[in-house]
Image (tube, rainbow, N blue to C red):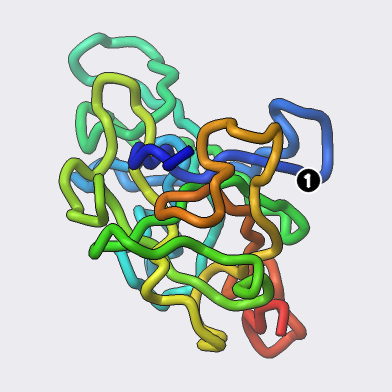
Amino acid sequence: MPNNNAPFGFIPYRGNGAAPTYELAARYIKSDNTTKIFQGDPVIPLTTGYITQMSAGGTVRCEGIFWGCKYLSTSQKRTVWSNFWNGGDASSDVEAYMYSNPQMQFEVQSSDSGGTAAVAFANIGEYVNIGYGIGLSGTPNGNTATGLSTASVNVATLATTVTHPFIVVGLIESPPTAEGTDAASEYNRVIVAFNNASSRTNGAGPTGLA
């Protein structure tokens, strides 16, 4: 059965701690950062110490997968808990929560701008970069109604390029006929792990899994 093109970002597949929360690390978003960050978006570190959304095709090391935030709302005069950062309305730094454990693995949809390619079993062990939006169009870059990401992994970037932020470690193949399990058609779902990540280091900076 063909897969649907409905990217949902990166969701925890397995890792340390207990599902569904696993282990969340805290970082900060600068209050004047107008870039929206959605639940399931990869995030990167800034030279200021804050984090922001990873760009499509980016090679900056990944800091983790964003899962929500809290902040003091300027308009509501109270603390707001949200599954996404809306790009404004905070009176001070935004406390962000993310999955950053180096052993975490995530389920994510694969996408191809041509709409023809899938991630195959033979691609396990290859590195991959990300894109946003339906069909990697970049629009919409997240869903403000649900707060959920539209990130996916870009099939066209599958390679041995070690600077890509993720590595393919498996395919979602069960239960049979379930959404995303058709590995013969585009938009299949895959399991990825961190590769070029801040949490993976040998003392000389991120090294990935290779």
Left/right of residue 30 with respect to residue 59 in the rendered view: left
Percent of width and height locating residue 87 = 22, 38
Residue that extends furthest to the front in the rendered view of this protein: 1
Residue that extends furthest to the right in the rendered view of this protein: 17
Question: Is any atom of residue 121 visible in this view?
Answer: yes
Percent of width and height locating residue 175 = 70, 32
Q: Nearer the viewer, residue 131 or 84?
A: 131
Q: Residue at image x 38%, y 46%?
A: 29
Task: Name the quadrant of the C terminus.
Answer: bottom right
Left/right of residue 90 with respect to residue 159 in the rendered view: left
Percent of width and height locating residue 162 = 56, 86
**What residue is shown with label 1?**
15
Q: Secondary structure at mark 1?
A: loop
Label 1 Cα neighbours within 10 Å, binned few <14 / some 14-19 / many ≥20:
some
Q: Residue at image x 44%, y 35%?
A: 39
Up the image or down, 188 lies above or below 40; here it is below
Up the image or down, 179 lies above or below 112; here it is above
Q: Nearer the viewer, residue 51 or 77?
A: 51
Left/right of residue 136 with respect to residue 59 in the rendered view: left
Q: Nearer the viewer, residue 41 or 198?
A: 41
Percent of width and height locating residue 142 = 28, 38
Amino acid type at circle 1 is Gly
**Tag count in the figure?**
1
Q: Quadrant of residue 90?
A: top left
Q: Residue at image x 21%, y 27%?
A: 89
